[in-house]
Image (spheres, helix red, strand yellow):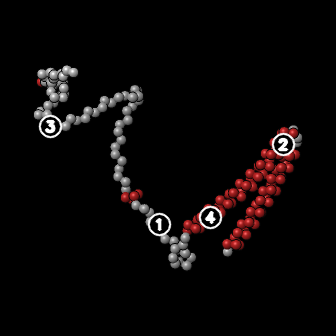
Amino acid sequence: MTQSTPEPNSNQSGHRPITKSMKSARPNAASPQESTEPPRPSKPPEVDVFPGLPVIPDLPEPPAMPTLLTQPVRQPKTQNILGMGERDKGKEQRKNVSDLGRAWGVAMDFIFTIVAGFLVGFGIDSYFKTLPLWTLVLMAFGFVYAMWRIIRRSMEDEKKEKLSK
């Protein structure tokens, strides 16, 4: 194995040293003695991505958030019927929402039972090419069945209400 000798113009790392002619060849190269300021980042050139459309300028900073919007709202105290203590409004609201949902459920059950009877009867009449006999019969049956379900449900609710008292 032969050992290579470094060239006379190279330093210990094996790279050529920068000469004065090389420094002058670089246009913006300033030596550390000439300037102590850090180099400023150059602003990227604005590229017109969509030619023909106007350029939207940068938006200003939004104003500071008012303190009124950052503080929680104080809830007013409610009193019971006698004017003493606080009333629990949450329990009443939950019961009202529950009752409202139950009422809508009964109403939709009534309507969809009648509509289902109508559609099944219409399907049978269309298949057998008969008069609208099955449509009327099954729609009436849907009405009777829907009324029976409403009565049964109201009786169950009355039993639950009696047991809870």
**Residue 38 on image: x %, y %:** 19, 37
- For disc 4, the marked residue is 96
In primary-sequence order, the first of circles 4 and 1 is: 1
In primary-sequence order, the first of circles 1 and 3 is: 3
- For disc 2, the marked residue is 124
- For disc 3, the marked residue is 36
Residue 88 horizontal side relative to residue 121, left or right: left
What SS does tag 3 mark? loop
- For disc 1, the marked residue is 75
Looking at the image, residue 157 lies above or below residue 23: below
The residue closer to the viewer here, 13 or 148, is: 13
The residue closer to the viewer here, 32 or 6, is: 6
Instruction: Mark 2: give few (<14), some (14-19) or many (20+) Cα within 10 Å.
Output: some
Of the two numbered discs 3 and 2 in the rendering, the one whose residue sits closer to the viewer: 3
Residue 151 horizontal side relative to residue 54, left or right: right
Kind of residue at disc 3:
Thr
Label 1 close to label 3 by CB (< 8 Å): no
**Residue 45 on image: x %, y %:** 31, 29
Of the two numbered discs 2 and 1 in the rendering, the one whose residue sits closer to the viewer: 2
Spatial CA span between label 2 and label 1: 60 Å
Instruction: Mark 3: give few (<14), some (14-19) or many (20+) Cα within 10 Å.
Output: few
Kind of residue at disc 2:
Ile
**Residue 88 on image: x %, y %:** 55, 70
Kind of residue at disc 4:
Asn
Which residue appears at 59% of the width and 68% of the height?
Answer: 92
**Residue 121 on image: x %, y %:** 82, 46
